[in-house]
Amino acid sequence: MSLLARLVALWLVGRQLGPGAGMQPAQTLTCSRWGTPSDGGLFEDGDVIIGGLFNLHYMPPVKDQRFTLEPDNKPCTGLQNLPLQYIYAMVFALEEINHSSALLPGVKLGHRIHDSCALPAWEMQAALSLVGGDAPTCNLDQQETEVGAGERRVPLIIGGSSSITAQILSRFLGPLSVPLVSYTASSPSLSDRRQYPNFFRTMASDIYQARAIAQLAIKYNWTWVGAVVANNEYGLMAVKVFQEEIQGAGVCLSFVETLQRENIVSDASRAALAIQASTAKVILIFTWYTDVMELFLQLEKLNVTDRQFLASEAWSTSTDLRQSAFSRKVARGVLGVAIQSSSLPGFGTFVRNLNPSLRPNDQVLKEFWEKEFGCSPGIGATPSSSSLPPCSGTESLRDVKNLFTDTSQLRVTYNVYLAVYAAAHALHSLLSCPDVSSSPGQNVTCSLHTQIKPMELMEQLSKVNFTTPQGEAFYFQGADVTAKYDLVNWQSSPEGEVNLVLIGRVDSFDLHLNESAIQWSTGSSQVPVSVCSERCPPGTRMASRKGEPICCFDCIPCADGQISNTTGSTQCNHCPSELWSNAERTACIPRQLDFLSFNETLGITLTAVAVSGVTATTAVFVVFLYYRQTPMVRANNSELSFLLLLSLKLCFLCSLVFIGRPSAWSCRFQQAAFGISFVLCVSCLQVKTIVVLAAFRSARPGAEALMRWFGPRQQRGSVCLFTSVQVIICIIWLSLSPPEPRPDLKIPGLQVTLECAMASVVGFSLVLGYIGLLGCTSLLLAFLARKLPDNFNEAKLITFSMLIFCAVWVAFVPAYVSSPGKYAVAVEIFAILASSYGLLFCIFAPKCFIILLRPEKNTKKHLMAR
């Protein structure tokens, strides 16, 4: 921009040269300084002059001055009260400093305050005039660094009424190293010291107010927020920062509508329709108050009155907006961020004591007097005021109520005040002013140089760190100051007015709210709700919808064994293994122990079947005992038959041990009883089969001595031997690693089966394996003896019984493994009963049939017949 600044300066000089300038010798070329459109500003001489640029008027002359720098000496019109207060805040601060013995002693600060008429081009021209000095002519033969006679250049300017203007001024003043201190420019881009090294501001960056509004949305769980922003850096930056701040906090933007100043009516209408169509009840508006006024007008037409608006500082304190009729209907309970308000002791009195008679050279005050009282002060009357009647002299500002005299909440005004004090402290350091406190009662002065270099002043300005007369610490962080905002609320009064109420503040990143003082859009203290989807109740979790923001979701019940005990849970948590979810899926409760009991249908049925088996076995035993002398009983080794019946009865009875609540003793006893009973049973069958084979072998010549090895004593010994092996296996197993009653927590459900858990699968496998070994051996021997020539060969009956026995236990293994909980116990009981009934009926049913129903066949002759 250095080249651009030089080109503009050369162009300004060239416009001053007359038509015959080219005919003059180069060494005699001179130029005269332009006047500025704000030559009628506010000026006060002093040892050091501080420049000031303010938008005092808002209506430019008829000739458009927006794109030309050449003045036409036509003043602006439309005096604004609030910028007038800014100007006199600067004057007040300068007078306060000039009367201070501690700050810049012996140095008088003057001011040159110009009106830019809200035109960036005029503000730039006034700034160039300030830094160019006040010499009426210049000699082009002189070097750039030389200072003309009587020239008074301004080393610092307080101005830049908008971010765009501040950017332009900073770039133009940058090559000259003239510091620019803005009181309202808030664009984040101005914090870049590489682009704007000479820029300072007493207004916080817009980043912080966007973050503050995002924190409000997060605090009140407004997860579905709409946004209407200005289509420029101010609005688009705010949306970007807002989105960055809410990322990961569960807050989403429902829509983003932009407003263009040139198409404000159509854009406001489109934004109003978007607000009406959206389910978002909280709307962020980041734009200028005039745009908001048009938006509220469109919302009133659509009768949209139930939205909670979040306001940026650009319109949150707008009196015109609050006092409009449609705002009272549409914008109830607005919650906004505002520039921090502060009090200036003595400033209110200073303003109300202003009088043109006391300030005869103050043309700005005269113009305000004419506007406010409709009379001419009669001091230095201007042609524009000659038609007004003279003032009586009794006019006073003490009873005037407007934005100029209202000093209750000073916001931008206080920023101007801070800017002046920052400049004064920088000058104090630059001029090596002495410490007044070290030499009380002595007249001390600063070492005032003939020319203050802006570069040196800029360096000192970046280092200022002082406490204001109000006790507030102030310092610059680069170009910025510590972010401090007020949180304001629009509240309706009983008289129908909308008042601005302070309900909190923002200090850096901390929110301080008096929540009980907030009046919401609902008209009460009830916080409005703005969500895309209602928060999921306990017992459910959020499931995002495909293609929609994360704030829009469905609530899915937690699965069995999982819970969510908070509202808005994103996931369900698994219950510990010993607990299970309740019916509502909101808490983990202890799992209920379940086991095969005598009280349930399955337990009763199995018990009845087992008791029936015991009864049937007892009946057969009684029959065999009664007919023990008959050939049928004696021919089939009655002693082994009685022992077999006893073992079958034990098999039926051991099934009952599996029913009921498992305990330490029952878990040990049931497996031992089961294993020993069946080994005893199968051992008897095996010995009976061996006896049959031995009997027929002994009938052959030379084999008479074979039966000596299978006499009654040997038979009993064999049964005891086979059974003792199982007894030893059970003793070792139950001693080292016995089954223990333990809930089966692997099976899902509220009810958990209390079972006898096998601590050692090897022990249980040995018990079953030994039974299977004896069973297979018995089956093989019986199969070999099935065709022996007796009329009643018991080997056939043993073959069928062992086939059933083996089939049952082969099917038992997969059925037992795949059965859940107590049904595994039921499967084992069924296998015991089925195999027991198979042995009982296959071996003893035919014998009982002959004994009871065919007694004629119960003879030795019939049994021995081939």
Image: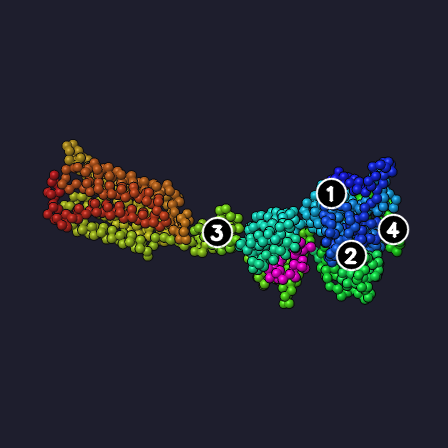
**Residue highlighted by disc 1:** 171
Alpha-carbon span between mark 4 and mark 1: 35 Å
The part of the chain drawn in magenta is 311-339
Alpha-carbon span between mark 2 and mark 3: 59 Å
**Residue depicted at 61% across the width and 61% down the height:** 326
The residue lying furthest to the front in this view is: 19
Alpha-carbon span between mark 1 and mark 3: 53 Å
Residue type, numbered disc 2: Tyr
Alpha-carbon span between mark 4 and mark 2: 26 Å
Quarter of the figure with residue 817:
top left
Q: Relative to the observer, which residue lies in front, 483 or 708?
A: 483
Decide whether residue 317 is among the magenta residues.
Answer: yes
Residue 566 in sight: no
Residue type, numbered disc 4: Thr
Decide whether residue 125 is among the magenta residues.
Answer: no
**Residue highlighted by disc 4:** 445
| Residue depth check, mark 1 versus mark 3: number of the one nearer the observer | 1
| Residue depth check, mark 4 versus mark 1: number of the one nearer the observer | 1
Where is residue 220 shown, x and y percent of the image? 58, 56
Contact check, label 4 and label 1, Cβ < 8 Å? no
Q: Secondary structure at mark 2?
A: helix
